Amino acid sequence: MKPSESIKPISYLKTNTADVVREVNENRETIIITQNGEAKAIIQDIATFEETQETLALLKLLAQGKRSIEQSQSRPFRAAINKLRKDLAKTSA
């Protein structure tokens, strides 16, 4: 469904809540709810929401890694592995 076809006024949601929930879960489509002609909320199934949250978490990790590289707070992979091995050897001795 096109985003323009998934826009519903809040009055539609009030009178068709069960149908909206069923439709969202069956089709995994997001519905945009408007109030006074303005987009105010979205409704989506839980699986789509969870996927979005996982994607955002991964993107956040990538952004943090990029910032660390830009701020020279990173080290080459081999150096990091060697340090970890050295640290593990100290703790197990």
Image: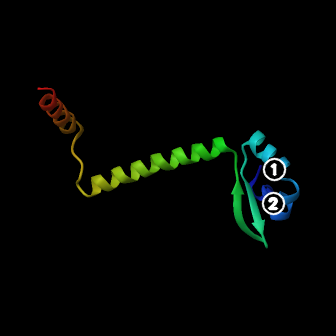
- Please tell me how crowded label 1 is: few (under 14), some (14-19), or many (20+) other residues with Cα within 10 Å: some
> In x, y percent, where is residue 42?
70, 57
Give the quadrant of residue 14. bottom right
- Side of 69 where 18 appears, left or right: right
**Secondary structure of residue under mark 1:** helix
Of pointers 1 and 2, the one earlier in the residue sequence = 2
Q: Residue at x 79, y 73 (%)?
A: 36
Callouts 1 and 2 close, C-beta under 8 Å: yes
> In x, y percent, where is residue 15?
88, 57
> In x, y percent, where is residue 11?
85, 64
Q: Residue at x 57, y 47 (%)?
A: 52
Q: Residue at x 85, y 47 (%)?
A: 19
Nearer to us in this view, 42 or 4 = 42
For badge 1, the amino acid type reads Val
Examine the rendered structure and indicate whether residue 14 appears above or below residue 44: below
- The quadrant the C terminus occupies is top left
Residue 8, numbered circle: 2
**Secondary structure of residue under mark 2:** strand
Residue corresponding to mark 1: 20
For badge 2, the amino acid type reads Lys
- Side of 54 where 17 appears, left or right: right
Q: Residue at x 28, y 57 (%)?
A: 70
> In x, y percent, where is residue 46?
66, 44
